[in-house]
Image: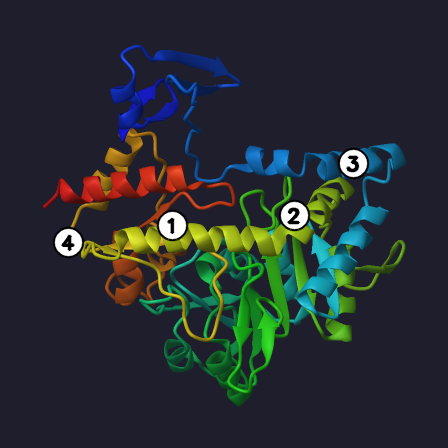
Amino acid sequence: MLQQFFGCANVVIKDEDIKRSNSIKKQCILFSKKCIFAARNNNNTVVPMNPIQMVDLRTQYLHIKEDIDAGIAEVLESTAFVKGGKVSDFQKHLEAFLDVKHVIPVGNGTDALQIALMALGLKPGDEVITPTFTFIATAEVVALLGLTPVVVDVDYETFCINPEAVEKAITPRTKAIVPVHLFGQNVNMEALLKIAKRHRLYVVEDACQSMGAVYTFSDGRKLHSGCMGEIGCTSFFPSKNLGCYGDGGALFTNDDNLAEQIRTIANHGMRIRYYHDVVGVNSRLDSIQAAVLDAKLPHLNDYIAARRRAADHYNKAFAACRQLVTPTTASYTTHSFHQYTVKTNGIDRDKVINRLAEKQIPAMIYYPVPLHLQKAYLDCRYQEGDFPVAEALSATVFSLPMHTELDVEQLNYISDNVLKAVAEQN
């Protein structure tokens, strides 16, 4: 294949097309900030390739535009922008999808985590165990509430919290564990729940990256991510597997009393209007975002299947490359591939990322600094070297484009250029 770039465009022209024709008409068309190159041969064949993005929300929108637009128009027509019917519709539909008793929509995933800890009645000084390799929000809400974050190392294969490390970190002050289902894969929840039960601890699942992943217990039971502990939390940030067009989040629980407490806290501590029983916050999902999510929800399983196909393509392409360690899916869980994250072995990942950028292929590092080494969370209890797995991951991982709209041509182009960038360092 002959591959070229014109401005922001990725161009793919078959070599045989060039050989068959001495005169190929080439056109470069620039519109909507997107450059598409079209090569026409004697058969008038056009072979374009769209620009590669980490997440392609526009193309996804175009596939379901009619449903999205209709849902938003309904909200605008009703003017029920807050606590409207679209919010309750989405809530009921998501409860059915997850097979969970209560879904409580809120403003974002970080709010969900904070409200969950507030609903459990934790007090300043209580310890909450969480992984050190995660997005900052997991520990952020613990600190904001005056609780004590206790960080532990993760499993090298799955990137998720290590249950053995959790048990070693438990003290008489420990009250809760916040496992993070990182990158789309469930934590080993059966082991973690046994530890929590043994020590009488709450489990609040951070399922902000794992919507749609399913956990299988040893007795054959299957439960959705976020529906195994006392409370589960998720985010509907636009790039998520189920994402809205702004901010949004939700909490899940099968406990009626906790559900009532969560709803109260999220509504300024009110059960009855203007009567405030507890200290609360103002956090709610607006009707327009609910309309978007309700239109997307019926497609979620297809979206996850598309992500898995893309991950399988990458896995096969990199299988023989010893410098790249592809992600592992544990036997007890499915993987929804919010991110496709590889570990580098014996190469400079920054050089790979820079080379990909030259070819207009984005790549990201999730996450370059573990929590215990972040400036805001430096603590005399922890030193560099205390969590070797998390520190090694932060130094070696990078993530490739992963979304529902990746086609084979794009995946081939990405994979080929990753392998070329790696080969340059041999």
Going by the image, does 193 lie left or right of 24?
Answer: right
Of mark 3 and mark 1, the one earlier in the sequence is 3
**Distance from Cα at disc 2 to Cα at disc 4:** 40 Å
Q: Quadrant of residue 76?
A: top right
User: Does residue 267 appear in the picture of this structure?
Assistant: yes
Measured as percent of width and height from the top left, residue 246 is found at 63, 39
**Mark 4 belongs to which amino acid?**
Gly
SS of the residue at dot 3? helix
Using the image, determine if residue 171 lies above or below residue 181.
below
Residue labelled with disc 4: 346
Of mark 2 and mark 1, the one earlier in the sequence is 2
**Distance from Cα at disc 3 to Cα at disc 1:** 36 Å
Q: Which mark is residue 366?
A: 1
Q: Residues within 10 Å of mark 1 (few under 14, many from 20)?
A: some
**Distance from Cα at disc 4 to Cα at disc 1:** 19 Å
At 41% from the left and 26% from the top, the residue drawn is 47
Going by the image, does 319 lie left or right of 58?
Answer: left
Measured as percent of width and height from the top left, residue 132 is found at 39, 62
- Which residue occupies the foreground of this view, 347 or 297? 297
SS of the residue at dot 4? loop
